[in-house]
């Protein structure tokens, strides 16, 4: 065989397979190709292709692009041919950089050592039961592949991280179910206070039956979950007391909930948000249940009742058995105006800081936008969009009485129109 020329990529990988000793499926071969730094361009399989135990493997490998080398029958015949062929592989393929030696026979250790001595990176591929092990002979690192599941077997650390993520997701799911249960319990209490249209005895029977179902269902739900894993990084947040989270009035709670709902509406692109989701977000942020906080100010009340008690701020609706909340139109307009004023003040502070050495002078709006991004961690255009103020920074500046804008060349500049009193 004539020597091969060097490829433009600077190197290739080659796979040598003892087909009598090891079988490689397509997915397994793709896994091996993902471990090397060069394209796996050459695949060579050695076997006595007349051996009936091989069946139609020669046709299958040929269809997959393998070069087939026939050896006569006999013990270690394929191994011997692989060693002889592989020892001169640099002569045949001068651009080879990495080689997979696929055989569980110990005799192939001689070939691996010879290839390493020639400066090549060697991957020794063996199989034990259903696990394929790939050892990088240069650095000793090993990767493992499940032939039954046809996927890589992660390290213990990676598996522990996956378990931690699953536990975290389960914890969040439990919080959400608790929030939904709380809403259903509130509906049940409200239903209980409604006068039944039927007879008193029938109403009592219905109530007793429902309470029995709730009681039995609660007992089943509170069965403790035992996890025999010690993952130090997985910490479940503790519930805080209502007095320790810094919300000292219902008006303060209202402002927090308005901001939370407005943000959720923008992020989820929905007109209204399920109350259970707001409860979950509130608990995630404050480690305190919103219902308990409301009860701290209004005994025997709840978050849903709080929303209903402020119709000028919150808009409630019941879809199926799920309460959803939105910001009332007047409150949304007021919130937008307040947000616009706050953003205007923030930009004014940036302009004042950038022109501190020459008060009243103009400065490029691109420089102002860059400083805003640096201070607040997000582009000014994204902030404008989140407040429903459009996406054009120049237009926003022109709409504010606090600024004066001019065009100089191809750029726009901004200055403070009048000093703050």
Image (cartoon, rainbow, N blue to C red):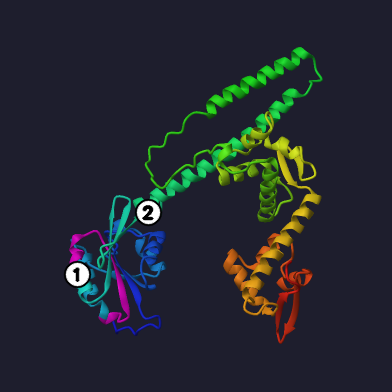
Q: 239 left or right of 82?
A: right
Q: Nearer the viewer, residue 267 or 123?
A: 267
Q: Secondary structure at mark 2?
A: loop
Residue 349 painted magenta: no
Q: Nearer the viewer, residue 354 or 324?
A: 354
Q: Residues within 10 Å of mark 1 (few under 14, many from 20)?
A: some
How many marks overall? 2
The residue labelled by disc 2 is 154
Picture coordinates of residue 401 (x, y %)? Answer: 78, 69
User: Is residue 231 something one can see in this rendering?
Assistant: yes
Q: For residue 287, what is the image quadrant?
A: top right
Of label 2 and label 1, which has the lower sequence position? 1
**Circles 2 and 1: CB atoms closer than 8 Å:** no
Q: Quadrant of the C terminus?
A: bottom right
Q: Which residues are magenta?
A: 91-111
Q: Residue, x 67% and y 43% (percent of image)?
A: 253
The residue labelled by disc 1 is 113
Q: Residues within 10 Å of mark 2 (few under 14, many from 20)?
A: few
Residue 109 painted magenta: yes
Q: Which residue reaches farthest bottom?
A: 409
Picture coordinates of residue 274 (x, y %)? Answer: 68, 43
Q: Is residue 315 above or below residue 95?
A: above
Q: 60 left or right of 399?
A: left
């Amino acid at each position: 065989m004539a020597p091969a020329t060097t490829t433009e990529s600077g190197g290739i990988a080659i796979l040598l397979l003892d087909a009598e000793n090891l079988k490689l499926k397509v997915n397994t071969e793709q896994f091996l190709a993902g471990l090397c730094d060069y394209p796996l361009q050459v695949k060579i399989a050695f076997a006595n292709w007349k051996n009936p135990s091989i069946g139609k493997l020669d046709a299958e490998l040929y269809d997959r692009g393998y070069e087939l080398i026939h050896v006569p029958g006999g013990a270690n015949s394929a191994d011997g041919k692989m060693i002889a062929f592989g020892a001169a592989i640099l002569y045949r393929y001068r651009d080879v950089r990495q080689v997979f030696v696929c055989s569980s026979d110990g005799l192939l250790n001689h070939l691996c050592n010879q290839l390493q001595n020639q400066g090549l990176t060697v991957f020794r591929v063996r199989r034990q039961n259903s696990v394929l092990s790939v050892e990088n002979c240069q650095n000793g690192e090993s990767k493992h592949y499940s032939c039954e599941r046809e996927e890589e077997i992660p390290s213990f650390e990676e598996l522990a991280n996956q378990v931690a993520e699953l536990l975290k997701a389960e914890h969040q799911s439990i919080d959400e179910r608790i929030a939904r249960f709380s809403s259903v319990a509130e509906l049940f209490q409200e239903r209980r206070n409604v006068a039944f249209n039927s007879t008193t005895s029938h109403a009592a029977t219905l109530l007793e039956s429902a309470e029995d179902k709730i009681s039995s269902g609660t007992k089943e739900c509170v069965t403790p979950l035992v996890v025999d894993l010690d993952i130090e990084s997985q910490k479940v947040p503790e519930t805080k007391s209502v007095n320790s989270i810094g919300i000292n009035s219902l008006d303060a709670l209202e402002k927090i909930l308005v901001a939370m709902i407005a943000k959720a509406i923008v992020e989820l692109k929905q007109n209204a948000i399920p109350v259970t989701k707001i409860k979950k977000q509130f608990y995630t942020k404050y480690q305190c249940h919103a219902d308990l906080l409301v009860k701290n100010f209004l005994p025997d009340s709840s978050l849903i009742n709080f929303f209903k008690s402020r119709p000028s701020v919150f808009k409630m609706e019941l879809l199926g058995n799920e309460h959803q909340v939105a910001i009332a139109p007047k409150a949304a307009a007021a919130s937008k105006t307040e947000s616009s004023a706050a953003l205007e003040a923030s930009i004014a502070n940036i302009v004042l800081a950038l022109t501190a050495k020459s008060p009243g002078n103009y400065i490029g709006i691109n420089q102002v936008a860059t400083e805003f991004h640096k201070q607040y961690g997000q582009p000014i255009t994204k902030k404008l969009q989140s407040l429903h103020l459009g996406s054009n920074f120049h237009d926003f500046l022109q709409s504010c009485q606090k600024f004066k804008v001019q065009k100089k060349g191809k750029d726009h500049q901004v200055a403070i129109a009048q000093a703050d009193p």
